[in-house]
Image: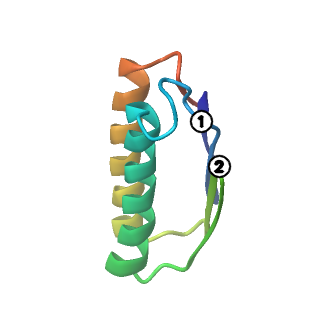
Amino acid sequence: MITILKDDDRIVINGHAGYAPTGCDIVCSAISVLTETLVASLEELTYDEISCHTDEGFTEIEYEKDLSEKSKLLIRSFFIGANGVADSYPEYVRII
């Protein structure tokens, strides 16, 4: 299962969906694309400082609590997509 946790100053995405074998898992792919797009968008479209740590099945995005409105909008957009995946595949994605 993929778990997505949002705190005041970070987002942590952890785990593998287990929906299908590696390389064929559409749930993992969907969350991965949303995550990579969020990181790239925060880096390229805003002036906010972020830190991103990734490892196999793990991403942590850290940021200041006083984000710009643009960054807040990008994060809300990420969660719209992530919630859509979680709603469609609730046994594979959990948002905390």
Q: In the rendering, which numbered label is found on residue 7?
A: 2
Which amino acid type is shown beneath numbered disc 1?
His
Q: Nearer the viewer, residue 83 or 56?
A: 56
Q: Nearer the viewer, residue 50 or 30?
A: 30
Tag 2 near tag 1, CB within 8 Å: no
The residue under the point 54% across, 80% down is: 49
Q: Which callout, 2 or 1, points to the residue nearer the camera?
A: 1
Whole-percent x, y for residue 16 in the image: 59, 36
Whole-percent x, y for residue 92 in the image: 52, 23
Could one spot residue 65 in this view of the protein? yes
Whole-percent x, y for residue 91 in the image: 53, 16
The residue under the point 36% across, 60% down is: 37
Residue that lies at the very extreme toward the top in this rendered image: 91
Q: Pick the quarter of the image with the N terminus.
A: top right
Residue 21, relative to residue 42: is it above or below?
Answer: above
Residue that mark 1 sits on: 16
Left or right relative to 54: residue 83: left
Left or right relative to 93: residue 26: left
The residue under the point 35% across, 19% down is: 88
Left or right relative to 91: residue 83: left
The residue under the point 32% across, 77% down is: 45
Residue 6, relative to residue 93: is it above or below?
Answer: below
Which amino acid type is shown beneath numbered disc 2?
Asp
Residue 69, relative to residue 13: is it above or below?
Answer: below
